[in-house]
C-alpha cells in the first residue's frame, strides 16, 4: 500500500494536483490517484461528453490513458482476477468500472461480495447487468454501480434477439422505466446500448444517471466504444455503431506472414546445411575429440 504522501505509482500530491489528478483511497484500502471520482463524473453530467473505452490488454489500457481517454471499462473474472489487475496497473490514473459476469451473482449477498472482490483489485466502480434489487444491495454496501439498459446482449431473448431496442413507444417507455429503476436503486450511471439516438437524448435529460452510449448516438453523457473497434484489431465485418481509427489487423496479418517466412527460411537452411554455421557452434580441439573417441571405443 502506498503511503499518505504519494498516490498510486508514487506521484507526489503536488504533482498529482498539477496534472489534475485526485488523491483517492479505493474501497479495497489502497491509496491512488484518479482523473475522476464518482462525484466528479456526476457533477459533469450535461456539461460535456466524456470518452470511454474497454481495453483488452495492459498495452491498450496504457495507450488509452496516455491518449487522455476519460474513463474505462474492464472485464473482471472473479476466478481469474489478474488480467483486470494488470490493466489497472497499466492505467493507474484513469477511472475504471470493472464489468462483472452476470451469472457470478445469484443473490444480493453474492452481488455485494462480487462487487467487493472487484473493488479490492482496484475498480473504481462496477458495471453490471443486475436487477435493481441487486444494484440496491451493492450500492447500500458502498459499491458504485453502473447498470445496463436497452439491448443487453445476455438478456436479448426478452427483447427479440440482438437487434435495436426502443423503436416503438412500448419499448421506449420500458427502457425509460428500466433506467429510472436503476436510478432509484442507487446507481450512478447506466450503459445504454443500441437504442434510437433521439430516444437516448430525451432520456438523458430525464435521469440523474450518467448515460454511457454505445450504438445509441451522441445524446448521452459518455461515448463508449470498445478498444478492439477503435483500433481495428479484427477484420470486417464491423458493428454498425463502430468506427475503426486504425487497422491493426493488417499489421497482425503482416506479422503472421513474417512469422511464416521466418520458419520457412529456417527449415530451408537446416535442410540445405546452411544452419548451424561456424558462428553458431562451439568447437573443441582435434586432440580432445580424438582422445574422447579413443576412450569411448576402448571402454569395456
Image (cartoon, rainbow, N blue to C red):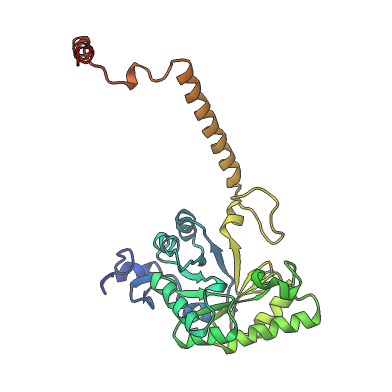
Q: Quadrant of the N terminus?
A: bottom left
Q: 220 left or right of 299?
A: right
Give percent across and percent down for residue 88: 42, 64
Q: Residue furthest front?
A: 300
Q: How many marks can you see?
A: 0
Q: 159 left or right of 243?
A: right
Q: Residue furthest right?
A: 168
Residue 13 in view of the camera: yes
Q: 3 left or right of 35?
A: left
Give percent across and percent down for residue 10: 29, 64
- Is residue 172 shown above or below 250? below
Residue 70 in view of the camera: no
Q: Quadrant of the C terminus?
A: top left
Give percent across and percent down for residue 293: 23, 12
- Is residue 180 shown above or below 68? below
Of the pair 56 and 299, the residue shown nearer to us: 299
Of the pair 17 and 232, the residue shown nearer to us: 232
Of the pair 67 and 77, the residue shown nearer to us: 77
Q: Quadrant of residue 206?
A: bottom right
Query: Residue at the spot x=44%, y=15% of the render?
Result: 273
Q: Quadrant of residue 164?
A: bottom right
Give percent across and percent down for residue 176: 69, 83
Query: Residue at the spot x=41%, y=64% of the render?
Result: 85
Q: 289 left or right of 157?
A: left
Query: Residue at the spot x=69%, y=62% of the render?
Result: 241
Q: Quadrant of residue 227?
A: bottom right
Amino acid at each position: 500500500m502506498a503511503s499518505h504522501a504519494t498516490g498510486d505509482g508514487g506521484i507526489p500530491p503536488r504533482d498529482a494536483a498539477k496534472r489534475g489528478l485526485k488523491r483517492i483511497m479505493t474501497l479495497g484500502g489502497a491509496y491512488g490517484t484518479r482523473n475522476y471520482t464518482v462525484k466528479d463524473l456526476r457533477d459533469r453530467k450535461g456539461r460535456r461528453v466524456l470518452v470511454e473505452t474497454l481495453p483488452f490488454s495492459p498495452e491498450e489500457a496504457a495507450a488509452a490513458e496516455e491518449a487522455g481517454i476519460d474513463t474505462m471499462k474492464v472485464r473482471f473474472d472473479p476466478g481469474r482476477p489478474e488480467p483486470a489487475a494488470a490493466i489497472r496497473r497499466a492505467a493507474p490514473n484513469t477511472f475504471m468500472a470493472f464489468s462483472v459476469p452476470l451469472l457470478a451473482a445469484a443473490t444480493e449477498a453474492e452481488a455485494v461480495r462480487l462487487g467487493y472482490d472487484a473493488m479490492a483489485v482496484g475498480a473504481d466502480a462496477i458495471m453490471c447487468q443486475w436487477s435493481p434489487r441487486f444494484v440496491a444491495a451493492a450500492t447500500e454496501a458502498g459499491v458504485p454501480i453502473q447498470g445496463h439498459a436497452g439491448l443487453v446482449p445476455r438478456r436479448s431473448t426478452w427483447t427479440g434477439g440482438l437487434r435495436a431496442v426502443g423503436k416503438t413507444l412500448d419499448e421506449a417507455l420500458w427502457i425509460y422505466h428500466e433506467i429510472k429503476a436503476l436510478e432509484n436503486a442507487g446507481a450512478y450511471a447506466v450503459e445504454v446500448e443500441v437504442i434510437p439516438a433521439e430516444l437516448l437524448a430525451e432520456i438523458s435529460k430525464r435521469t440523474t444517471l450518467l448515460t454511457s452510449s454505445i450504438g445509441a448516438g451522441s445524446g448521452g453523457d459518455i461515448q463508449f466504444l470498445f478498444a478492439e473497434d477503435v483500433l481495428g484489431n479484427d477484420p470486417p465485418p464491423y458493428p454498425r455503431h463502430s468506427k475503426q481509427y486504425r487497422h491493426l489487423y493488417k499489421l497482425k496479418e503482416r506479422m503472421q506472414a513474417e512469422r511464416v517466412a521466418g520458419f520457412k527460411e529456417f527449415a530451408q537452411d537446416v535442410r540445405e546445411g546452411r544452419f548451424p554455421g561456424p558462428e553458431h557452434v562451439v568447437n573443441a580441439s582435434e586432440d580432445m575429440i580424438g582422445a574422447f573417441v579413443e576412450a569411448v571405443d576402448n571402454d569395456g
